[in-house]
Image (tube, rainbow, N blue to C red):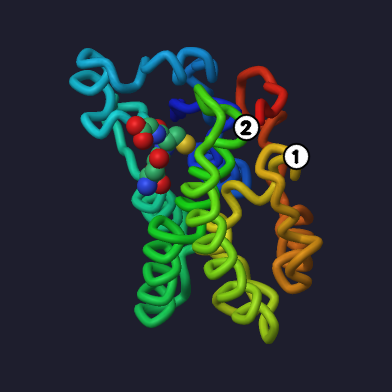
Amino acid sequence: MLKLYGFAQSGNTFKVAFLLRALGIPWQPVPMTFADFAAGSTREAAWREGVNEMGEVPVLEDDRGRRFSQSGVILTMLAEQHGRFGGKDADERWEILRWLFFDNHKFTSYFATYRFMKAFGPSAPDPAVMAFLKSRIDSAHAIVDKHLATRPFLLGEQPTIADISLSGYVFYPVEESGIDIAGTYPNLGAWIGRLRRLKGWGDPYDVMPGERIAPKY
Ligand SMILES: N[C@@H](CCC(=O)N[C@@H](CS)C(=O)NCC(=O)O)C(=O)O
């Protein structure tokens, strides 16, 4: 059975779990708590050598023991293997890739960093850093909101791994980030609603192992 390394607060892990569930593929989580992660478990030399040199989750391990990291790669691989959510032709696959890069650089990464610092960071976040991140988040959200004004999903009528990738952090409680995406951006809000209704969707805290933690700052 496929094994997924990650923890409940990790939206990057949730992306992979969401697709596995949407595809109906059996998988099991490799137990890891946020406390393990915060203590640096994924950055230890043994973990880098044995699991992922990049010191990150998610990591997906197949039944031959091969390990894959980078959620965009894992989503692409699973979509290709199962012939779903990966686009119908080369043009769509390149369009998906375009959104995966945008997501990894801007849509997910700034938001995930902001939320981590606000909710779970080791010390109170620096307001100047948060202001910078917030401006980048606002820009990314506005771009996707505009794109979704004329289509239900990023590529059009059907959901793809581009939607699943960008949705990694949008289902977590608003109080963790303090950013009400659905309340601020109507098209993003409607898209989040459509994704919630997809077969396989679940709340990240139900889908992945680990305790909920009250936001700190
Ligand atoms: N681009 C990567 C990002 C993965 C990532 O940043 N994962 C976080 C947890 S959600 C992590 O492991 N961070 C550890 C670190 O940055 O050192 C992906 O999409 O898989």
Q: Is residue 75 visible?
A: yes
Secondary structure beneath dot 1 equals helix
Residues tagged 2 and 1 counted as in contact (Cβ below 8 A): yes
- The residue type indicated by label 2 comes to Ala
Q: Amino acid at mark 1?
A: Glu
Q: Position of residue 109 (x, y in %)?
A: 45, 51
Residue 76 screen position, x and y as percent: 39, 56
- 192 versus 21 height, above or below: below
In the figure, is residue 208 to the left or right of 182? left
- Find residue 1 and name its label: none
Q: Which residue is rendered at x = 37% and y = 15% of the image?
A: 41
**Residue 59, image quadrant:** top left
Give whichever of discs 2 and 1 has the lower sequence position: 2
Asked if 102 appears above or below 90 in the picture, the reply is above
Q: Residue at x 47, y 71 (%)?
A: 87
Q: Looking at the rendering, in which quadrant would you find the C terminus?
A: top right
Vertical arrangement, residue 164 with respect to residue 21, above or below: below
Q: Is mark 2 within 8 Å of ligand 1?
A: no
Instruction: Residue under label 2, please give it.
Output: 119
Name the quadrant where ligand 1 sits: top left
- Single out the residue that lies furthest toward the bottom: 150
The image quadrant of residue 166 is: bottom right
Q: Which residue is mark 1?
A: 175
How much space separates mark 2 and mark 1, taking CA atoms? Answer: 8 Å
Residue drawn where x is 55% and y is 77% of the image: 155
**Near-viewer residue (75 or 193):** 193
Query: How many dots with numbers?
Result: 2
